[in-house]
Amino acid sequence: MDIVNVDILFKIAGIGIFISVLNMVLKQANKEEQAQMLTLVGVVIVLMVVIQLINQLFISIRTIFNIY
């Protein structure tokens, strides 16, 4: 179970690093509007991962406490 948590952390960190590097490249090319959109897309992707984790948490809680 711990390995899964570490993988998710690395996935989120990797997305963050990748988006920030692309963001810097776009800002250097004077394409700030595209950089902002890219940042927004990165945030949405990370939020989707976090929402999936929260869903798994609620499923685990339902299973543990036998809530239907």
Image (cartoon, rainbow, N blue to C red):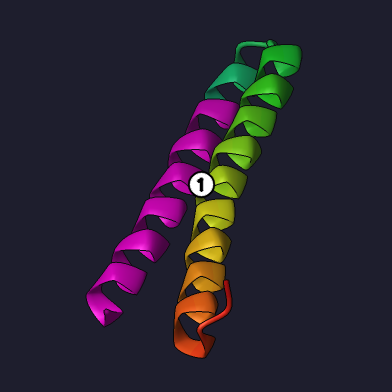
66 or 10, nearer to the observer: 66
Q: Amino acid under label 1?
A: Gly
Q: Position of residue 17 (x, y in %)?
A: 46, 46
| Prevalent SS, magenta region | helix
**Magenta span contains residue 19:** yes
- Tell me the residue at 28%/81% (across/down): 2
54 or 2, nearer to the observer: 54
Disc 1 crowd, CA 10 A, few/some/many (<14, 14-19, 20+):
some
Region in magenta = 1-24
3 or 42, nearer to the observer: 3
- Tell me the residue at 57%/71% (across/down): 68
Q: Position of residue 49 (x, y in %)?
A: 50, 50
- Tell me the residue at 28%/69% (across/down): 4
Number of numbered callouts drawn: 1
Q: Is residue 49 above or below residue 40?
A: below
Q: Is residue 42 above or below residue 50?
A: above
Q: Position of residue 12 (x, y in %)?
A: 45, 53
Residue 29 lies in quadrant: top right
Secondary element type, mark 1: helix
Q: Position of residue 55 (x, y in %)?
A: 54, 60
Read off the residue under disc 1: 16
Position of the N terminus, as image quadrant, is: bottom left
- Tell me the residue at 73%/25% (across/down): 36
Kindly give the residue lying farthest to the bottom in the view shown: 65
